[in-house]
Image: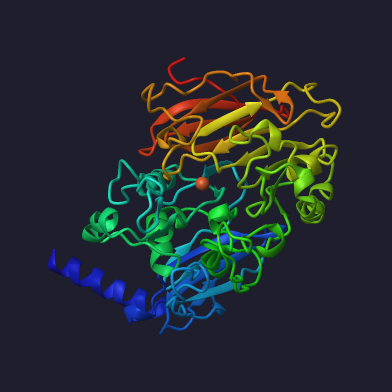
Amino acid sequence: MRNCALLLAALSLLAGCATSPTDDRQRALSSWLQLGPGGDGSLRAIVRAGADCPTAMIDRVARPMTSRAEPGKAPPLTGAGGNRAFNPEFAVRSCELAVPSPARDASIDGRPIPLPRGEIKRIVVVGDTGCRIKVPAGGKGDPIQDCASPAAWPWPRIAAAAARARPDLVIHVGDYHYREYCDDPQRCSTLREQGVVVGYGWAGWDADFFTPAAPLLSAAPWVFVRGNHENCDRGGEGWMRFLSPLPYQACGNQMYKSATRSVLDNNLTAAAYRIDLDSELGLIVADNSGHEDYRPARETPRDVALFRQTLAVLREAPATQRLWFFSHRPVWYDLLDPASQPNALQTVLRNGLPANVQMAFAGHQHAFETINFSPDADRAFHPAGRPAQVIVGGGGTQLESLDPHSPFYEGEGGMGSKERARPDGRLYDGVAAATGLVLNRYSFLLLERDAEGWGGTVLDPDGLPITRCRLSGGSKELACRFPGH
Ligand SMILES: [Fe+2]
């Protein structure tokens, strides 16, 4: 037994010498592979401010990573009106490396990084995962989510369960960072006692996303969609440092809910890009996080013009390829009132969405929802039928059912009372849905490719099935059973 232990110790020492730094302070705090424009792989790592970017091993060749964003210190806030989302503290270096294609294996510090492997058959979709804390001094503000409770904030459980689902690809539809600020000494004292971290800098990002996401970042390559919580006037600086598909640029000094707020035009909005899973299926990844979708298009002409530019990739895919469109804000959803529709995105997609777009995935509404339209429901603007809208927004952030301002608030009716097995007749840009459901539950979606198309399973934070869905062939309906039926 003792000899075995000695042998193991010696072997692990040798392995460590070959590929990883001996000084723990040099070791990457987080590392992952993300797919970007054209499906190219970008290896990313975060290291402490005093550490150099690591050297990755790709197919046994040492390749030094380069610095993507240098450590940065926040300037002091200037009085009560100071903008804390501008240039917050990042005492870390962000590193990147374009992965040559094809590559068979990759590692950082001896830790394997999953590369795309063969046919992508299992896709995990998660969204809206951060723990909600936004408490102004002296004001009522939002309810404080209990980030220390696995029941009240289940993102760490969801990330672990999603990793156990052995995905080939993970797609996060945005809103990673919700720990904005807590300024009311009385309301925030419990948080401080529990050591809950809040803020737009590295510490907030690490607590809200990187530490809980670690098992899922190690499980598969990722696609990151930008949420409105990653706008420049909120967690945008972290988005640009760590997850953006663009080369790093510093966010501007924009103040949330002020005249300088983030809109598409000043938000370092990336052009939508395509990732081909194979010749039959491509993913379009769009950044609509700065879109003021609650305003009608006539009030936001600049957004209309910008969407025409940034969504150009939609028209470039071969007509024979099916496309799935990913954005944070849905094209159609329940939180838009009729007076705001059509908004700029809906306007641009009217007679602008190619017939081969089969599904539109999003988050933003904190629930799981499918909205399926009859093929001929909107012949004037979508002659080939509207794609199915699928919302995967129950990833950990306080659910709509718990938010008194949401139409799905369940306060009076109790849990499940605002869940729906079928559409309620409301109009989405003038059109009612034919089928669909709403589940006010913490959940994520697993899509599995089979001979007939794709099977979907909505899973709870422990990985247990809530319900099952099916996307058959080229149909534009994700058909899900209501739980228990
Ligand atoms: Fe959200």
Give the answer, above or below, for where 153 lies relative to 90.
above
Q: Would residue 400 appear left or right of 119 to someone viewing this image?
A: left
In this view, the residue farthest toward the top is 485
Residue 60 in view of the camera: no
Residue nearest the viewer, comparing 430 with 4: 430
Q: How is the structure coloured here?
A: rainbow
Give the answer, above or below, for where 188 lies relative to 395.
below
Residue nearest the viewer, comparing 281 with 396: 396
User: Residue 467 at what x, y percent from top left?
Assistant: 47, 25
Quadrant of the rendered image containing residue 342: top right
Give the answer, above or below, for where 218 lies relative to 170.
below
Give the answer, above or below, for where 322 lies relative to 101.
above
User: Residue 249 at what x, y percent from top left?
Assistant: 63, 73
Q: Would residue 238 appear left or right of 270 to someone viewing this image?
A: left
User: Residue 98 at what x, y percent from top left?
Assistant: 63, 70
Where does the N terminus fall, quadrant-wise? bottom left
